[in-house]
Amino acid sequence: MTSTADLLAHARRGPRRRRALVVSTLLLLIASLVLVRALLGDYRVSFPDALRILGGEQIPGASFVLMESTLPRAVMAVLAGAAFGAAGAAFQVMLRNPLASPDVLGITLGASAGAVVAVVVLGLRGTPVTLAALSGAVVAAGLILSQSGGRGGATGRMVLVGVALAAGLSAVVHWVLVRASIYQAQDAMVWLSGSLNSVTWGEIARLLVIEALLVPLLLVLGGRLPVLGLGDDLAAGLGVRAGRLRAGVTAAVVTLVAAATAIVGPIAFVGFLSGPIARRLVPGGPAVGVGALVGAVVVLAADYLAAYGIPGTALPVGVVTGLLGAPVLLWMLRSRPSTQEVR
Amino acid sequence: MTMTDVQAEAETGTGTEPVAPVPTRLRADAVRLGYNGRIVVDGVTLDVPAGRVTVVVGPNGCGKSTLLRGLGRLLRPSGGSVLLDGDEIGTLRTREVARRLGLLPQQPIVPEGVSVLELVERGRHPHHGLFRAWSRTDEEAVASALERTDLVHLAAVPVDSLSGGQRQRVWLAMVLAQVTPVLLLDEPTSFLDIAHQLDVLDLVRRLCDESGTTVVMVLHDLAMAARYADHLVAMRDGQVVAEGPPATVVTPEVIEEVFGVAATVLVDPASGAPVVIPRRRTP
């Protein structure tokens, strides 16, 4: 009998080690990228100086750069990346379709449309913009999920409706922009391509509160998604109420995406990329947590590249993730061994 | 592996008196089931004998799988009721039902990149609350399920790389790890060659004989049904035509009524089970 126990322990060791290695590597990567992003900008801040500034000391120049520009950017990159990454991975696993991330399905664009209308037409700022983004995302999600056919998987029709909806929503966004003043329109354009410029600590606090509530919730619900992945009947047989679980995950995903989008804009492809990368790193493992970490790494790295990749030109982060995302999408479509998940 | 531990858990999970066998754990009472207003099972009453293998047979579309879905709470009856240990099954919590009753649908989805061990571990889901960690009982249930299905050596292998027969054993291992006193299986042998069919059905037989599990399964193959059932239920057009021990159900008259086929019934000299030789369709 000990032999069975030994064999099982042995079968567990590989995936466990791999998961631990992946998670610690990603955490280390996030920590070092935050340091790089915060300290090695146009104006370099030394590590000891940074510690002194964080301790409350004022250093002329360095204090302003670190506390008002580079550090909030780095922290927001982590928060936004984690939100998009966790949300994307959760949706892809729940709908059993790697295309079914909130950005591909148009939910992120729903949030954008809501936010643009709030900012440009209604002249709102702060929390009301988040609420407007949330209502846009909820409407978009409702429309798309009503096309899921009731069996829980993302059907081709659902993805197509999502793509059509995204096209319609971007028309709404552009129509609003055309009617806006040139200043408003320029602000909105930068935000729409996804940007971490001019992030404030107040916005960070707002997103942090939402994530502190929803990311743990999504991790708990995400732990049940593997059971749901066996099909609704078997999931019910194992004590999981598919409808309720789906509703819970959807609510958490939509809120996270809307909250992050309202602040930094729809950073392209982060939700879409993080899930597949996470699942390649830990096959068969829980994707939501690793997806959040991957999302944070992607946004941090892309933002640094966007800011300093081309000397003298600061691009919005979304331009870089978009440029990275398109080839990865093509590569994923080509390298998929089976169409099992894409139905 | 200490089967008594695992069995004890199954018994305490039921909330009824342990050890003493109850005459029936699962009962359908004039149950009516259907989809979108179309009635598929119409007023079936069935007492599932406890600790026995009950097999439901019938032609395609007779409602046998639908009946099984009703018994497993996957489908809410539009009339009548299903009772699990005397409780109306619809009033029990999903997780509570999952601790007492395991079910295996016809074609579950094989997730990508998941190992045999990880899949079988999911069978323990109903026994876990939000904060309960993996316990010794969980480990023993999983180990025992893998041993009984002869899958220990494949524990680390991804399920999607296995053959059809091996996969079916993995699904069975998963519901075995669930350790429920009642087990519902929907055509567990479909798409398997004859050797793998025997593997699966022998396993089910042993499970019933050794652990006293109450099994209800739908089978396509009348010969296999007659050989492995203690209690055979023949259905046609959403109703039970005949039920009882295979020797009393598998008769030329019943076969003609249920399947519309004229047949000769012989007796297997080895097992004493009836053997059907179909002759021709009757109009």
Image: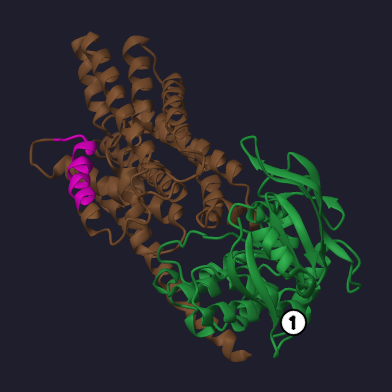
Q: Is residue A94 above or below residue B197?
A: above
Q: Is residue A322 magenta?
A: yes
Q: Is residue B249 above or below residue B274?
A: above
**Amino acid type of the residue tagged 1 in the rendering:** Met
Chain ID, mark 1: B
Image x and y of residue B3, in percent: 74, 82
Give me the residue at 7% from left, 41% from top.
A311
Query: Which sits in the foreground, B174 or B132?
Result: B174
Image x and y of residue A166, in percent: 31, 29
Image x and y of residue B165, in percent: 49, 75
- Can the viewer see residue A114 in this picture? yes
Q: Is residue A156 above or below residue A182?
A: below
Disc 1 element: helix
Q: Which chain is brown?
A: A
Is residue A35 rendered to the left or right of residue B179?
A: left
Rendered shade, chain B: green
Q: Is residue A155 above or below residue B170?
A: above
Viewport quadrant of the N terminus of chain A? bottom right
Q: Quadrant of residue B278?
A: bottom right
